[in-house]
Amino acid sequence: MSKAITGGCQCGAVRYRVDVELSNPHLCHCRMCQKAAGNYFMSLASAPREKIVITRGNPAWFHSSDIVRRGFCPGCGTPLFFDPVNTDEMLVTLGSLDDPSRYTPTSEDSVESRVHFLPHLPGLHQKVTEDDFGPDEIKAISESNHQHPDHDTDRWPGEDKQ
Ligand SMILES: [Zn+2]
Ligand SMILES: [Zn+2]
């Protein structure tokens, strides 16, 4: 049996499970997805609506149009869901999965809005975290990390370190 498909927001207030393999993993470059992600594109994959189960908390919803609402954590703002309300499908953001590398995107959508420099990103100067943060800073971040771990938890925030 393959590993459960779970995910959630950065603060851990909203968690979800998907009870089927997601389909159509893709990147959407449309202007609404850029804005909703606060990024150059949004990564999404879909499942039948009833297969996406919210297991903790309640997302907030913003209708970016009458036919689509977008779900996000009201506490930390992580984009989680893309919901075409008149369909039987819902989409989750691939970056919010506990294993964000589980699905390789198979298409880029709405490329007419894609930022022009995106194809050149792999050529950018490459750095690792240690190039920008010293050992003391890395330790301080690690020891005060408030991000929910990449697996379900019985209780969160926990009193103990993860
Ligand atoms: Zn959150
Ligand atoms: Zn889009």
Image: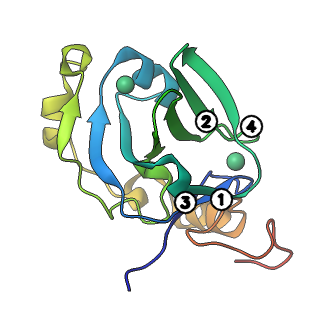
Looking at the rendering, in which quadrant would you find the N terminus?
Answer: bottom left
Q: Is residue 156 left or right of residue 81?
A: right
Residue type marked 4 = Pro
Q: Which residue is mark 4?
A: 74
Mark 2 or mark 1, which is nearer to you? Answer: 2
Measured Cα–Cα span from mark 1 to mark 4 = 15 Å
- Which residue is labeled 2 in the image? 71
In this view, 8 is above or below 102: above
Label 2 vs 1, first from the N-terminus: 2
The residue under label 3 is: 7
Q: What is the distance, in whole Å, between disc 2 and disc 1 at their CAs?
A: 19 Å
Instruction: Say which residue appears at 76% left-offset and 41% top-offset.
Output: 75
Frontmost residue, 36 versus 141: 36
How many C-alpha atoms fall within 10 Å of the one at disc 3: few (<14), some, or many (≥20)? many
Image: 67 above or below 50:
above
- Between disc 1 and disc 3, the foreground one is 3
Res 146 quadrant in image? bottom right
Could you give the CA–CA distance between mark 2 and mark 4, rounded to whole angstroms? Answer: 9 Å
Disc 2 marks which amino acid?
Answer: Gly
Q: Is residue 80 left or right of residue 147?
A: left
Ligand 1 within 8 Å, label 4 CB: yes
The amino acid beneath tag 3 is: Gly
Residues marked 1 and 4 touching at CB (< 8 Å)? no
Query: What element does badge 4 sit on?
Result: loop
* Residue labelled with disc 1: 147
| C-alpha separation, residue under disc 4 versus residue under disc 3 | 16 Å
Q: How many marks?
A: 4
Depth check: 124 or 8 in front?
Answer: 8
Q: Please, what is the three-letter code of the amino acid marked with disc 1?
A: Gln
